[in-house]
Image (cartoon, rainbow, N blue to C red):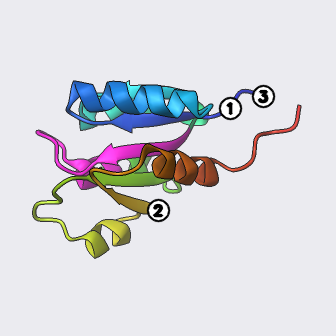
């Protein structure tokens, strides 16, 4: 069985590239989305293959919390971690109450994010 993907959602191309490379080096395959609406579309198409969504809080259009709310309509038990350098109108407690498993404040250690994502996905399937 294939390892689940991490869906990385950020409106900054450099962040998408860096996270995709770093998670890939940790053995975590990724798919990337540059917006909340693109993330929802990808999640709907690949729901069974995505283990965790790594979601930026501040994005134009659908922000992180609005994107998570839409993803929860597709799958109420979606696993999600928010990441943000500045949460804007959202406080950290509110983001966690919105259903996120974790919140990473930018700048963060990539190894910390990879470890948390791996923990949320669970142990590799035997096979």
- Nearest the viewer among 1 and 71 is 1
Mark 2 Cα shell of 10 Å, populated few (<14), some (14-19), many (≥20): some
Side (left or right) of 107 relative to 88: right
Circles 3 and 2 in contact, beta carbons < 8 Å = no
Q: Does the magenta stretch include residue 64?
A: yes
Q: Name the residue under label 1.
A: 3
Looking at the figure, which quarter contains the C terminus? top right
Q: What stretch is highlighted in magenta?
A: 51-68
**Mark 1 and mark 3: Cα distance apart in space:** 7 Å
- Nearest the viewer among 32 and 104 is 104
Task: Estimate the x, y position of residue 99 in percent, counting from the top left.
Answer: 40, 64
Of all residues shown, which one is farthest toward the bottom? Answer: 93
Mark 1 Cα shell of 10 Å, populated few (<14), some (14-19), many (≥20): some
Q: Is mark 2 on a helix, strand or loop?
A: loop
- Nearest the viewer among 75 and 110 is 110
Residue drawn at x 39%, y 35% as measured from the top left: 8
Q: Name the residue under label 3.
A: 1
Task: Estimate the x, y position of residue 97 in percent, counting from the top left.
Answer: 35, 72
Q: Quadrant of residue 94?
A: bottom left
Q: What element carries label 3?
A: loop
Circles 1 and 3 in contact, beta carbons < 8 Å = yes
Q: Does the magenta stretch include residue 12?
A: no
**Mark 3 and mark 2: Cα distance apart in space:** 25 Å
**Mark 2 and mark 1: Cα distance apart in space:** 20 Å
Q: Is mark 1 on a helix, strand or loop?
A: loop
State which tag comes first along the sequence, 2 or 1: 1
Looking at the figure, which quarter contains the N terminus? top right
Work out whether 91 lies above or below 101.
Answer: below
Which label belongs to residue 101?
Answer: 2
Side (left or right) of 103 relative to 74: left
């Amino acid at each position: 069985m294939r390892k689940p993907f991490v869906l990385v959602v950020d409106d900054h191309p450099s962040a998408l590239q860096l996270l995709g490379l770093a998670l890939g080096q940790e053995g975590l395959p990724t798919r990337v989305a540059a917006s909340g609406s693109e993330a929802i579309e990808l999640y709907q198409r690949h729901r069974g293959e995505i283990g965790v969504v790594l979601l930026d809080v501040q994005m134009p259009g659908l922000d992180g919390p609005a994107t998570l709310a839409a993803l929860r309509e597709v799958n109420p038990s979606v696993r999600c971690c928010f990441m943000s350098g500045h949460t804007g109108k959202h406080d950290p407690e509110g983001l966690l109450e919105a259903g996120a498993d974790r919140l990473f404040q930018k700048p963060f250690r990539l190894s910390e994010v990879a470890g948390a994502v791996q923990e949320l996905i669970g142990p590799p399937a035997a096979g």
